[in-house]
Image (spheres, rainbow, N blue to C red):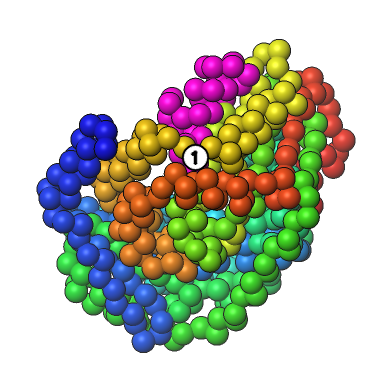
Amino acid sequence: MSSNLRNVILLYSLLISVAGAAPEVKQHVLQNGLKVLVKEDHRAPVVVSQVWYKVGSSYEYGGVTGISHVLEHMMFKGTKNHAPGEFSRIISENGGRENAFTGRDYTAYFQRLEKSRLEVSFELEADRMRNLHLQDKDFQKERQVVLEERRMRTDDKPRSKTYELFLASAHTNGGYRNPVIGWPDDIEQLTIVDLQNWYERWYAPNNATVVVVGDVQADEVFALAEKYFGVFEAGQIAENKPRIEVPQLGARRLNVKLPAELPYLMMGYKVPSLKTAKDQREAYALEVLSGILDGGSSARLSSQLIRGKQIAVAAGASYDLYSRLSSLFMIDATPAQGQSLSVLEMALKDEISRLRQQPVSDSELERVKAQVLANAIYERDSVFYQAMQIGTLETVGLDWQKMDEYVDKVNEITSQDVLAVARKYLVEEGLTIGYLEPLPLGKRLPAKASVGG
């Protein structure tokens, strides 16, 4: 073991001893099915409260894509007991901050408050869990807000647009084919009835998890949850069909031509997540593999392609360990001036070939493991991120205990494990390649060029 890894492990151990030996997450399930998870962290007089619903873009189907995100917007438009905008005003008056986010596998709402104000959060979140007042006039305005958000974040950003079309090419029928924000035509055709049905279908206590992390007592939090959320009956949650991606039978290619400053390349290999892997060790090996390619300046993509051969000006790799469905091992890169996308593609494939042919060195493994530990140290310092980890794991169908297993599981991975997953999953049969080929900036596109559906 290198001195660097030993030092990081020592620092990690010291942090745990100072913070109090990894406080246990305490769980309470209400009679209506609502799960409440509490992690006490008494280092500061603050509390983070989050409500996670098991619904996101991967639950959607053609014609209603984007509905989970639109409904997230509408959750701030008032209930039978609170006028539109009153939720945010009350949280602000109590010195707190609040927001929400929609992902592929979940929709979540959160507040960060002084610890004595947790009851304010619970009262408001319980109210809009079952008493949302959806009005068409608010919906018509908010739909335009979402369409503008889509234009600014996707349609007017060449790389974001390429990524959206890339996912639609890589996935044939799986839940990750559609963008979280939805396709434009689907957003425009949504109705207030669609939103009401979606709300009634998914927003129920037995489809939600409340996560609280901070300077609180678990028993007091459970009592508050019973008071505000326990009054609701369980909903009739229809079982979500699995929508398993059909096997890919060969490499796929996508060429996108948009006004852009630089060309861009994306590569995605079909891989399992921790939830879908038959052998969970494979998922942790893919996590390590991602760090070998893109884990700081010493990682292979940076040292070989950016500084070494100078073929790329940027390159990265990513893997979503905690997704609900099988996903993609992603590599993206921007070629250096004078280098073509095809040359860059061959250079990236050469790096993949090396991973498939030769075991990684002990020093590379130790570097990745040291980085994992360093990230764990940083994450333990954030009350909000601790809550995020707990909520994500629970909502995608993994127990929160996986959070505490992560460091040990990564440290168990060997060079042979990495070699095995590279040979099994980084193969042409499961590969999708996307090129962004720049058009001159300012070039006008056809009126429907921004529509991806």
Position of the N terminus by quadrant:
top left
Q: Position of residue 382 (x, y in %)?
A: 28, 47
Foreground pick, 51 / 304: 304
Q: Position of residue 153 (x, y in %)?
A: 62, 39
The answer to whether 416 appears left or right of 157 in the picture is left
Q: Is residue 407 on the magenta stretch?
A: no
Using a 10 Å C-alpha cutoff, classify the residue at mark 1 as few (fewer than 14 neighbours), some (14 to 19) or many (20 or more): some
Q: Which residues are magenta?
A: 289-314
Question: Residue at point 79% right, 20% down?
Answer: 440
Residue 227: quarter of image: bottom left
The answer to whether 9 appears left or right of 280 in the picture is left
Element type where label 1 sits in the image: loop
- Total numbered circles: 1
Q: Which residue is the site of mark 1?
A: 359
Q: Is residue 312 on the magenta stretch?
A: yes
The image shows residue 295, relative to residue 206, as above or below, that is above
The answer to whether 91 appears left or right of 68 in the picture is left
- Mark 1: which amino acid? Pro
The image shows residue 309, relative to residue 352, as above or below, that is above
Residue 392: quarter of image: bottom left
Question: Residue at point 54% right, 55% down?
Answer: 103
Q: Position of residue 16 (x, y in %)?
A: 17, 50
